[in-house]
Amino acid sequence: MNTQMAENITKDYYSQFCGINLTKLKYGVHFICSPERDKRLKGFGCKYTIYTFANDNLCVVSYAPKHKAFIEQLKKYGKDEIILAINQQFKLKRMQLMMFENEIVACYGNARILKTEDYPLYEAFFRATYPNANPSGWLYEYFIEKTGKEYFTGYFSGHKLLSVCDAPDMPYMEDKIQHTGINTLKEERRKGYAACTAALAVHNLIEKDICPQWECHVENIASIELAKTIGYKEYGVAYILEEWE
């Protein structure tokens, strides 16, 4: 998995959301009416009925057919005006999209790949980080599935997990690209554990010939900076209308 391969796979992945091959688009504004936008996304639990991808030179507005009348009114405007108009009409989620470039961190401290027998420690970590969530009936199966693929990494202090990089279901290209989500116990943050854990997750995926993927809310500056320290660069921003059934 070299830099060019990671770039190609990342662009292919986001092309699925846009309904058009991003590698063939160099600049300008493009509108794509796609029935794909009216499908519930695996791993997300909702529909992205408007998905606008934007970077310095390019803007792609992909939308479900039911939004056609509204989107048609925007075709005379430029990128910034389009994004502003959609955001005024709907409450959009704004996600910073990162692209993997190269490995930077080579020392992982006490981070390691989690195994099935680590479940009790993972459950304790999950309950500590998500105190209002109910893991009964699904967390164990999720953990066993992902650790069977060696997708989970964690940072240990004795018999306690301090930071975990998990692997949610991917809506597209699941055999080629994998998100590396990271969470750390509140009292253990800013100690370098997240960087070690996420860097090992990235390394492990690359060893498996799977492209690492990272995205987070644009307001999450800490997550963006963390991604950069382990080898990602900014790729673009997605402005998303989520619709839940």
Image: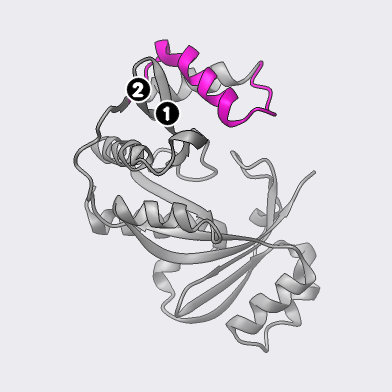
- Nearest to the observer: residue 62 or residue 232: 232
Labels 2 and 1 touching (C-beta < 8 A): yes
* Magenta run includes residue 116: yes
> In which quadrant of the rendered view does residue 89 lie?
bottom right
Q: Is residue 185 left or right of residue 71?
A: left
In this view, 77 is above or below 137? below
User: Range of the magenta residues?
Assistant: 113-136
Residue at image point 31% right, 53% down:
229
In this view, 229 is above or below 76? above
Residue at image point 49% right, 12% down:
120
Please say whether residue 98 is visible from this viewpoint: yes
- Nearest to the observer: residue 63 or residue 187: 187
Which amino acid type is marked by label 2?
Ser
> In which quadrant of the rendered view does residue 218 lie?
bottom right
Q: Earlier in the sequence, mark 2 or mark 1?
A: 2
SS category of the residue bearing label 2: strand
- Nearest to the observer: residue 123 or residue 2: 123
- Nearest to the observer: residue 201 or residue 210: 201
Please say whether residue 21 is visible from this viewpoint: no
Residue 163, x across and y down, in percent:
42, 32
Mark 2 lies on residue:
157
Q: Residues within 10 Å of mark 2 (few under 14, many from 20)?
A: few
Q: Is residue 243 left or right of residue 173?
A: right
Question: How many dots with numbers?
Answer: 2
SS category of the residue bearing label 1: strand
In this view, 107 is above or below 89? above
Mark 1 lies on residue:
162
* Magenta run includes residue 117: yes
Q: Residues within 10 Å of mark 1 (few under 14, many from 20)?
A: many
Residue 179, x across and y down, in percent:
45, 43
Which amino acid type is marked by label 1?
Leu
Quarter holding the C terminus? Answer: top right
